Amino acid sequence: MKVIEIKKSVFADNDKDAQALRGELKDKGVFLLNLMSSPGSGKTTTLIRTINLLKDKLDIAVMEADIDSDVDAVKIQEATGVGTIQLHTGGMCHLDAEMTRQGLENLPAGGARLVILENVGNLVCPAEFDTGAVKNAMILSVPEGHDKPLKYPLMFSICDIVLINKTDVLPYFDFDMEKCREYIRLRNPKAEVIPICARTGEGIDAFAAWLERNVKEWNNQ
């Protein structure tokens, strides 16, 4: 009982911090996207293609969260030229609102309208902590299987959009796209689902359009 009470307290405090952070972002005209997925699903490649489609329309910055290393931050910086920082979590498998705030405070000066947080690769922990983001997105790759919405319900239930990546390998895996869509609808009827291939660029324009539209709506509310 004691452990349960502590856990509830941790989540309640974080939820308050996250809500306050969203209010601050709204006042500043900053849209924060929290992007989550398993390791190796293609988050970084997807971001590079998406950013290169949008960077002439929006001022963009990226926060890369990892347990260690700056591999992805360097890759994005070199491939897109947008301001990028690396967040080391010290072994933790998620970011919470306070960690996100610290990252935002250390972004390069320049007033980005769109900030993308690439969360730690994990389908469990990141879903439990509200980062203060305006929208949550996730990537499910074809090799992971179409049953993941059944196995990781919370992740799919909190996401506003699900990108199904690596569609180029569909012929080689037992992945049922329609079943996957059905399972996602069971968890979250409102989630938008877009099949993509980050390697070839297929579907990235649809995701970029979704992101651009949501940034405009956030700033016009």
Image (cartoon, rainbow, N blue to C red):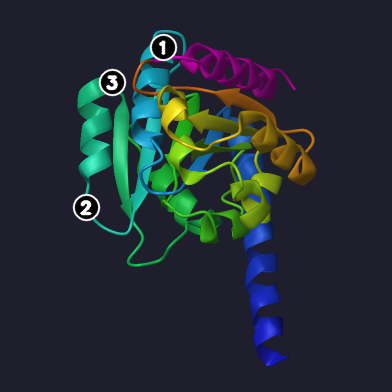
Q: Residue at x 45, y 26 (%)?
A: 171
Residue at image point 45% right, 14% down = 202
- Does 218 appear in magenta? yes
Tag 3 residue: 80
The quarter in which the N terminus is drawn is bottom right
Residue 78, percent from left and from top = 20, 26
Which region of the structure is painted magenta? Answer: 201-221
| Three-letter code, disc 2 | Ser
Residue topped by disc 2: 69
Quote the CA–CA distance across marks 3 and 1. Answer: 10 Å
Amino acid at the residue labelled 3? Thr
Closer to the chain start, of discs 3 and 1, is: 1
Report the Cα–Cα distance between label 2 and label 1. Answer: 27 Å
Residue closest to the eye, 3 or 46 = 46
Classed neighbour count for the residue bearing mark 2: other residues with Cα under 10 Å, few (<14), some (14–19), many (≥20): few
Q: Position of residue 104 (x, y in %)?
A: 43, 43
Q: Which residue is tagged 1?
A: 53
Of residues 78 and 113, the one nearer the viewer is 78
Disc 3, SS: helix
Is the residue marked by circle 1 packed among few (<14), some (14-19), or many (20+) residues within 10 Å? some
Task: Tell me what residue is drawn at x 64 percent, y 42 percent.
Answer: 22
Residue at disc 1, secondary structure: helix
